[in-house]
Amino acid sequence: MKHNKKSVCRRLRMAKVAFIGLGVMGFPMAGHLARAGHEVCVYNRTHEKAQRWVQEHAGALAATPADAAQGADFVFTCVGNDGDLLEVTNSPQGVLAGMKSGSLLIDHTTASADVARTLDSLSRDRGIGFLDAPVSGGQAGAEGGVLSIMIGGADVDYQRAAPVLEAYARSQKLLGPAGSGQLAKMVNQIAIAGLVQGLAEAVHFVQRSGLDGEAVFDVIQHGAAGSWQMVNRHQTMLENKYDFGFAVDWMRKDLQIALNEARNNGARLPVTALVDQFYADVQAEGGGRLDTSSLLKRLEKEG
């Protein structure tokens, strides 16, 4: 279900929210909520980062996730993986221990569909709504407030959440029951993996051919080969710069989630599995914190 932005704006009301996890994505996302006028309380495992957020946005800071969630209408989580997510939600000091009946938990973590379904069940047992809502758009999208949000859960909960999500969403869509958002994020990462490898090979070929790489990509990015990755990464790849956007370590985590799900549902992902191993090669060379376009470094090393 695609949401009509005009109707969202008309129904928007200010809410009391909690945001758990202030990494490269969560920090600006929580900031957009504060700038939209919501009353925001934050928690982050690294206390100094939470203090910095409060200094920038004049929100509140909590000592635990449960404290942050006290009295909140909406609680957002954006952490690293399934284990981190369960820790900040279902531990004795997790948000579920502090959330009130009738509130809504919205998870932006890229995690497994299984953990999304588990959190949906745990939330509903407490009279709390739940949406799994992973995002795409990277750090730049989070900072610019133009993320794409893939959502799983009940329509009634989505209708409540959509006006608030507009603070940082360029697009958002309800795709089915709990877990559907995470499955869609797997689709997103599968598509990106093969595309980035193709772009890396194209840049590598350009460099070996003697062509003017900038001129070539200026032409082809407007044709059938064009993509977000090509438009935004070809120049930095030509310049051998890889400190932009999503890290290899996180991409491997996401691809492992997708490959595990494929083993369960019978999908065949030969290219995804191969690119995952290419990223493992980058990690082995110490490139885990480089951005995903660093697949080019592997080709250059082989050459």
Image (cartoon, rainbow, N blue to C red):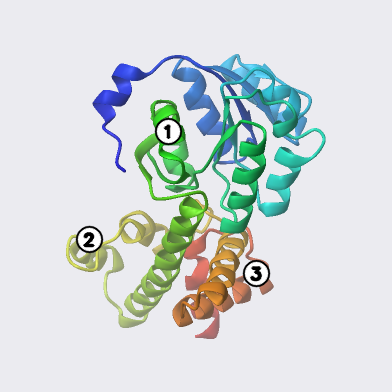
Q: Find residue 282 and report its horizontal and vertical position in percent.
A: 60, 72
* Residue 228, picture quadrant: bottom left
Which residue is rendered at x = 31% and y = 43% of the image?
A: 1
* SS assignment at label 1: helix
**In the drawing, what numbered circle is on residue 218?**
2
Query: For the residues marked 3 and 2, what is the alpha-carbon distance in whole angstroms?
Result: 31 Å
Q: Which residue is mark 3?
A: 283
Residue 156 badge: 1
The amino acid on which the numbered mark 3 sits, given as a three-letter code, is Gln
- Where residue 44 appears, as percent x and y from the top left, is 71, 33
Apparent side of residue 114 relative to residue 210 in the rendered image (left or right) = right
The CA distance from mark 1 to mark 2 is 45 Å
The image position of residue 101, as x and y in percent, is 63, 24
Dot 3, crowdedness within 10 Å: few (<14), some or many (≥20)? some
Image position of 60 with respect to 284: above or below: above
Q: Which of the 4 image quadrants contains residue 21?
A: top right
